[in-house]
Image (tube, helix red, strand yellow):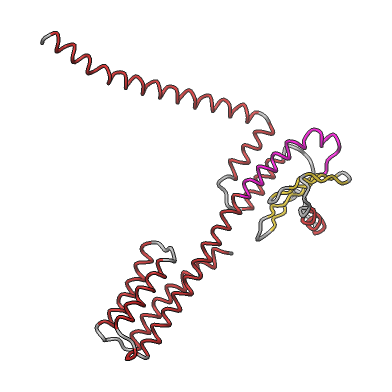
Amino acid sequence: MSANRVVSLVANNAPQNELELSKQKIAELEQSFASVNQMALGLLRSNSFLGGMIEFFERCSESRDPSEIGVAMESALSGYQLPYVFILNLPEQHYVFGGKNYVTNLQFDVITTLTLQRERIVNFDQYTLINFPYFSICLTMTAEDNEAYLDDLTRLAQVANYVLADLVRETQEKMVRQGIMQRALRRTEALLDNIMKMALDCGAHSIQSFSDLKWTIQSSIMGLDLDTETEQSIFNIVDQLMEQFEHQQASTRIIENYIRSVKENLSQLNAGCAGETK
């Protein structure tokens, strides 16, 4: 092998070696960053307040159950040894928690009334209210307790409000989607009723009329945002129905059976919608 050939091979291998070395260094850096993050998180957890807040956020950031969020908050508050009542102030329902203590009707009325105030912190007698739109907590605290714990408790309440605000936004978006679906269901059912009406007066309508109606129904069904399998099963029934018209074989009984089949599918979707909204 000539000297030029050897030099050429070394030159060609050099970029590859540099690439492998770079990948190795990047992997080492990523591992170092992960270790530093773990150490930092460990130090934060060692602080009783920050550790409790981190644990609360980890438990609740993916939860969509207000009861679970309430229980996690009770756990985060357990280190303070302060009597409290707090409320998860969701649009559709209030959830009130009192730790190990029973929440009386009077306490419920008081805290739900106080949450209507605009002030973030409300002090009266030995009570302190920390007030956010979706989370409020009323604690029995001395002046010394206020000095020692108020800032930390306010931050914890702010984190709870953030978690609940995210839950409320998702719930409202879901309700909007369900409202759109409900309207599309009603529209589709009305179109099916129109088919029956046209079938009873078949001579007055052309095949093109039925084809146009088929396209309208399919567009309406597509607006329901169904999974592919459910959507296709309904389309198949509509296709069979329109095929009867195209071959002029449809009796009102056959048409009625097809329409009933489609409506049964739609009513099941409607029932499912109603169940999710509750």
Q: Residue at x 35, y 89 (%)?
A: 252
Dividing the picture into quadrants, the one containing residue 215 is bottom left
Question: Looking at the image, is 258 positioned above or below residue 16?
Answer: below
Image x and y of residue 169, in percent: 59, 53
Query: With 217 as the anchor, is 96 left or right in this view?
Result: right
Image x and y of residue 125, in percent: 89, 45
The part of the chain drawn in magenta is: 140-165
**Magenta stretch: residue 167 in it?**
no
Query: With 203 as the anchor, is 67 left or right in this view?
Result: right
Q: Which residue is drawn at 36% across and 21% down?
A: 22
Provide the major secondary structure of the magenta segment. Answer: helix
Question: Looking at the image, is 43 positioned above or below residue 175?
Answer: above
Image x and y of residue 270, in percent: 49, 70
Dividing the picture into quadrants, the one containing residue 56 is top right
Q: Which residue is drawn at 82% across and 37% down?
A: 146
Query: With 94 as the anchor, is 232 left or right in this view?
Result: left
**Magenta stretch: residue 142 in it?**
yes
Q: Which residue is drawn at 16% across and 11% down?
A: 6
